Image: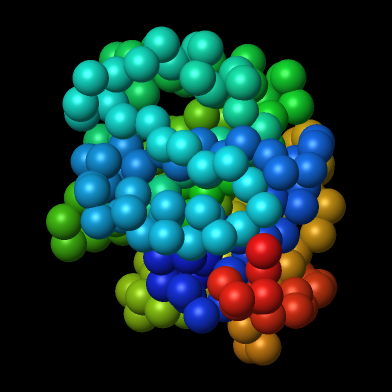
Amino acid sequence: MGGGGFSTEPDNLALDVYTIEQARRANPSVCFVATASGDAATYIVCFYAAFSQLSCQPCHLTLFDRTPDLRSLLLRQDIIYVGGGNTKSMLGVWREWGLVEILREAWDAGVVLAGISAGAICWFETGITDSWKGRLAPMACLGLLSGACCPHYDSEPERRPALHDLVVTGAVSSALALEDGAAAHFVGDKLFQVVTSRPNANAYHVRLDGCKAVDDVLSSRRLEKAMLSSAT
């Protein structure tokens, strides 16, 4: 998810409901991982406020408090949902805790891996991140999905020109760019479809055409609006 979801669209949980629907069983267990925000309490509370009213069993993982047995917790989940924040710091903490290997094991076992912003780009070979103050840059991520990914393509004005420059200079060969309200659904490592929670949200394949970068709009499916009162 390039942006949106429960934290910024509390009146429309279409992307979150769609994520729950991809689980291998009804009433799935969903673990929220808020490492990128430093396990921000307000973010975790916001997650429970939304997901406790959906057809799922919510829980969360903390890495800045007393940390549970990570493998035991994560491998019994149906969905692992990663929040936004500082991607570089998140991956550094994950590597220290050995979480990268556990997430790969979960992926191989059929656990749905989902996320927003930092939680979206982390699954790719390369993420376009603002982890550094004042600039956007590509950084190596987990590599479960090939290529590069850039979130917030419409809501943060610097994103589009920065990504275009990275493509033109060859820093990245191409990228998947997601606007807020747009989500890319992969089955295995192949893009299955793009879904959106907003009428004008898009996803793009950003590539080099001659000496300039171009945005190819990807076909998408608009999701029915899902509010808390009707999503349970």
| x, y percent for residue 142 | 51, 29
* Residue that lies at the very extreme toward the left in this rendered image: 133
- Closest to the observer: 98 or 42? 42
Q: Quarter-wise, where is residue 143 in the image?
A: top right
Residue 35 in the image, given as x and y percentages of width and height: 32, 37
Q: Is residue 51 left or right of residue 48?
A: right
Image position, residue 149 (x, y; %): 54, 52
Q: Quadrant of the C terminus?
A: bottom right
Observer-nearest of 212 and 82: 82
How many discs mark residues in the rendered view? 0
Residue occupying image coordinates x 62% and y 36%: 29
- Specify the farthest residue to the bottom: 199
**Of the pair 184 and 75, the residue shown nearer to us:** 75
Model colouring: rainbow
The reply to whether residue 62 is in sight is yes
Q: Residue at x 51, y 54 (%)?
A: 52
Residue 43 location, x and y as percent? 31, 54
Judge by depth and name the residue closer to the eye, 122 or 63: 63
- 64 to the left or right of 174: left
User: Can residue 183 be seen here?
Assistant: no
Quarter of the picture holding the N terminus: bottom right
Determine whether, in the image, residue 66 is placed left or right of residue 69.
left
Q: Which residue is drawn at 17% across and 62% down?
A: 134
Occupied quadrant, residue 67: top left
Judge whether 50 appears above or below 161 on screen.
above
Q: In this view, does 173 lie above or below 93?
A: below
